[in-house]
Image (tube, rainbow, N blue to C red):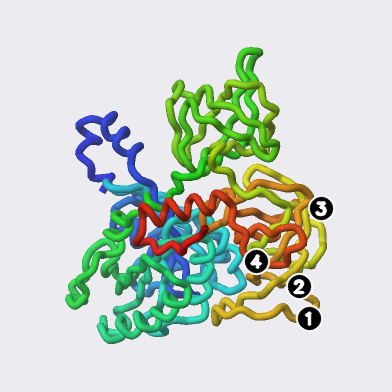
Amino acid sequence: MSHASTLIAEDIEAYLHQHENKDLLRFLTCGSVDDGKSTLIGRLLFDSKLIFEDHLAALHKDNERLGNAGEALDLALLVDGLASEREQGITIDVAYRYFSTDKRKFIIADCPGHEQYTRNMATGASTCDLAIVMIDARKGVLTQTRRHSFIASLLGIRHIVVAVNKMDLVDFSEEVFENIKRQYQAIIDRLGLQDVYFVPMSALNGDNVVNRSPDMPWYHGNTLMEILEHVEVAADVNLADLRFPVQYVNRPNLDFRGYCGTLASGVVRVGDPVTVLPSGKQSVVKGIHVYEGELQEAWPGDAVTLTLQDEVDISRGDILVHSNNLPGMGARLEAHLVWMGDKPMQLNREYGIKIGSKSTWGYVTAIEHVIDVNTLETEAPQGSAELPLNSIALVQLELSEPVPFDAYACSRETGSFILIDRLSNVTLAAGMIRDGLQSGQSAGRVYSSAEVNLNRFIRENYPEWGCKPVE
């Protein structure tokens, strides 16, 4: 573990360099109410010895007043910080925690289990690489298990760990564990999940969380920590399609004009021909600048400033792409929508829309179908065709202007958007683009060139992913 590294005492600069260059894994815990999500995170921190002494002392004091784990230390109090969370023993808002080991850095999103807070779970999942789906061994697969698994799948999370918790309450029964595996297999088949791990554990006692459990000798798989440290997520990054949303134009003096942003996907190099969208103007990358100096190339996640050889009109909301690999471009989209507003969504009402750094406005013109996340089946819209809180549907949108976009399956950053109330500026919905729609088209498949290129790249280089042909 990082806290035990001998480099801290021997060579602090080498340790800091090693720590800076570790991989980062973002993951969330989700599942039904009282499945032990917060306790699991507390156990990860506690058994990894990553809790400061003063924090641990405060935890013992809080445990005397608010603990819900009997004589044991209630580790959920490490994560549940709101007064109402501690009083009720539930998670209400998404809580983020950071820790690291010798092998990797982690950011955890602890998501609420109540159906009422589904929108909070979707928010926490939107940036994660892996989801830990908690299941109470006494109850098996529940409605919220299916709901959260579907949302994780919809939001593009490719790695799932099914943590069968509270095994100590079923006498560490292998039969119970295998039965839950069979139940969850129906979800795997329905959603087409590819990378799924099953771990029997007791978060309260620490069985198979960080340390292997002596009470379950029949389990020969990895502990949860071993899975988190070694799961391969580097292949999830889209290196094929350059997408550089411009966030700010840097003009410090007469001799410098740079375009600042974070590289959403692809690799950019000095000398690359690029196209500015939506204008379509072309130029060549002259320089890649960071605080420390200049680079010859930049990778996804790098925050950089690009300079171009030509004087091109570029402003916030524009996007730079490789000239031979353009995204889709259009004002009519088909997308999955997770409605987060307290008031129902209404057709043909004007909403603000933010795609990447681009802000515009538009309407939801049709609801193709609503998804029942309890059964994972699709249903025709009912009544007035409104979407209440926490609903998920496939909808059609019409924007006020054409925008560059990708299918969400190919690029999270340029394939996602939010709907905003234009009066209150409150976020009302999260959207994942599925297709572009041609003028006059109600529904169907229109592939962007970027989707075709990425799909072909995946099929040729990663056939094990099982990407369907797109031509």
Task: Identify residue for label 4.
Answer: 444
Alpha carbon separation for disc pair 1 and 3: 27 Å
In what element is the residue under mark 2?
loop
Which of the two residues, 335 or 77, is positioned nearer the viewer here?
335
For marks 3 and 2 on the same chain, the one whose residue lies earlier in the sequence:
2
Residue 62, visible in the rendered structure: no
**Would you say the residues marked 4 and 2 are in contact, meaning their CB atoms lie under 8 Å apart?**
no
Which of the two residues, 54 or 99, is positioned nearer the viewer here?
99
Task: Identify residue for label 1.
Answer: 383
In what element is the residue under mark 4?
loop
Nearest-to-viewer mark from 3 and 2 = 2
Looking at the picture, does residue 283 appear above or below residue 243? above
For marks 1 and 4 on the same chain, the one whose residue lies earlier in the sequence:
1
Residue 441, position as x, y percentages in the image: 73, 64
Task: Identify residue for label 2.
Answer: 386
In what element is the residue under mark 3?
loop
Looking at the picture, does residue 332 appear above or below residue 185? above
Nearest-to-viewer mark from 4 and 2 = 4
For marks 4 and 3 on the same chain, the one whose residue lies earlier in the sequence:
3
Residue 1, position as x, y percentages in the image: 26, 49
Alpha carbon separation for disc pair 2 and 1: 8 Å
For marks 4 and 2 on the same chain, the one whose residue lies earlier in the sequence:
2
**Would you say the residues marked 3 and 2 are in contact, meaning their CB atoms lie under 8 Å apart?**
no
